[in-house]
Image (cartoon, rainbow, N blue to C red):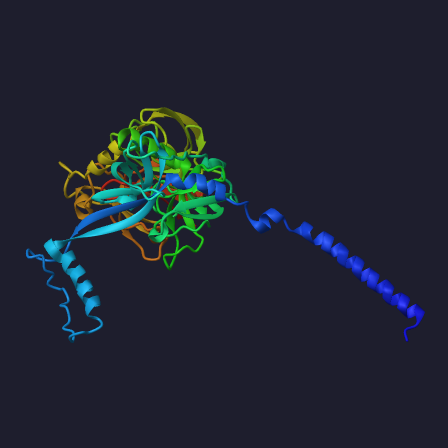
Amino acid sequence: MISTPLLRAMRKASLAATTALMISAAVAPSFVTPALAQGPESVANLAEGLLGAVVNISTSQTVKGSGGESGEDENAVPMPQLPEGSPFQDFFDEFFKNREGQNNGGSQKVQSLGSGFVIDAEKGIVVTNNHVIADADEIEVNFSDGSKLKAELVGTDTKTDIAVLKVDPKAKKLTAVKFGDSDKMRIGDWVMAIGNPFGLGGTVTVGIISARNRDINSGPYDDFIQTDAAINRGNSGGPLFNMDGEVIGINTAIISPSGGSIGIGFSIPAEIAVGVVNQLSEFGETRRGWLGVRIQPVTDDIAESLGMATAKGALIAGIIKGGPVDNGQILPGDVVIKFDGRDVVEMRDLPRVVAESPVGKAVDVVIVRKGVEQTVKVTLGRLEDGEKLAEGEAAKPEEGADKGAEVATASVLGMTIGELNSDARAKFGIAAEVSGAVVTAVAKDSAAAERGIVAGEVITEIAQESVSTPKEVTDRIAALKEQGRKNALLMLASKSGELRFVTIRMD
């Protein structure tokens, strides 16, 4: 029998425990945001309205086989002789029949699948990836309702991996989607991908933007959106939508050891895609702005040597002859920190902002020259013309040099420096237009060797001052040491005249 005081104590304890449990139950949910725990609301209505604009791209290509004139492959495996009534007879018959068909005539049809989307219903314009339709003989666009239309190629851009196709808008009523503003998208925003993974047809996946401004070394204008929305093989060329149903990216690449999605996919941002698509649609080709310079990154050492407080911008390593700035407006050694009002934080920023600018536009370029910030105005050329000009630059043999002249040498920073006369030019194959002092040898494990300097390169400038003899090189290094400098900034020319900058520690 329980005493009354004990019973009262037990009831009091029970009431306290119950009260604590109620408080716990009331407080606990406040630590969890329901929206984050449950994900976005249903995207069924959104997907239903977009599926009609997303298409599957089917291509075929005729590839020559390995057979000879007879169309027979000398390395072909002969069909095995099977016992009469063998259960494997049908299997082998079909297998070798297909092989014979492939080798017939020495060619075969290769098919591939990808994705795309309609952006102009009235004109029948479809966007996809260049690698989806590359080298295709025939391109077919398959719609979500099962209909199919032949497509013609309007234009491609290998640098951004974008292609524009055209189908007959009169043959079918088309549904189009529009591009959105990818710049407004933030890490953590919900996105939806629709595509044709593994040839399965229209497939919807949802995820978030995992990262922005990704450089995966696939091209000169890498600035990818990274997403964990499932993207697999066959999704290439398909759209990445925001929750308003606008295309903010073109799904292009994945990182996957197995070939399947592991939650790391990359999309070309609409910011880059829109300009390319518009140019391909209008001209059938791209027309990018061109500055006519060679650039390299600004490292901490280079920034210190140039008197810059922080390492930023794009270092001008060379000027292309005949280019837009081959008139002294911009010089090797200048650092571009702003272009047409847009900051150039890293080297890779400059090619993209220049390419996005109209050909013939006069723009203000902010540079740092010998530690002083200044603004120059340049008129842009066309990149596609500039590439041909750059390819045409060829080294010319030297004429009328003073052969047999005595070579003075000097040793500095692990390098042996010599005069650049006819013998040195002939020995190292140095072009006539290259001037400076030639590096004739580099000591193993020296500071110069660590920076990748090799014999045959020519020192043209030290700390943005021209040098042409071994004595000028040693005098310039000595002057820098007297100034308390820790690094020497060298501008080096290759045998053909291409320039680059390196910094060498002088302590």
Can you name the residue that lies furthest to the front here?
A: 85
333 vs 203: above or below? above
Q: Nearer the viewer, residue 414 or 169?
A: 169
Residue 486 appears anywhere in the view: no
Can you name the residue that lies furthest to the left here?
A: 69
Q: Quadrant of residue 3?
A: bottom right
- Residue 143 image position (x, y, % from top left): 34, 42
Image check: 83 left or right of 412?
Answer: left
Residue 389 appears anywhere in the view: yes
Residue at 22% in and 52% down: 110
Residue at 49% in and 41% down: 45
Residue at 27% in and 52% down: 441
Q: Nearer the viewer, residue 296 or 9?
A: 9
Image check: 394 left or right of 306?
Answer: left
Q: Nearer the viewer, residue 332 or 257?
A: 257
Count of numbered circles in the view: 0
The N terminus - image quarter: bottom right
- Residue 120 image position (x, y, % from top left): 35, 32
375 vs 468: above or below? above
Q: Nearer the viewer, residue 460 or 316?
A: 316
- Residue 99 image position (x, y, % from top left): 17, 60
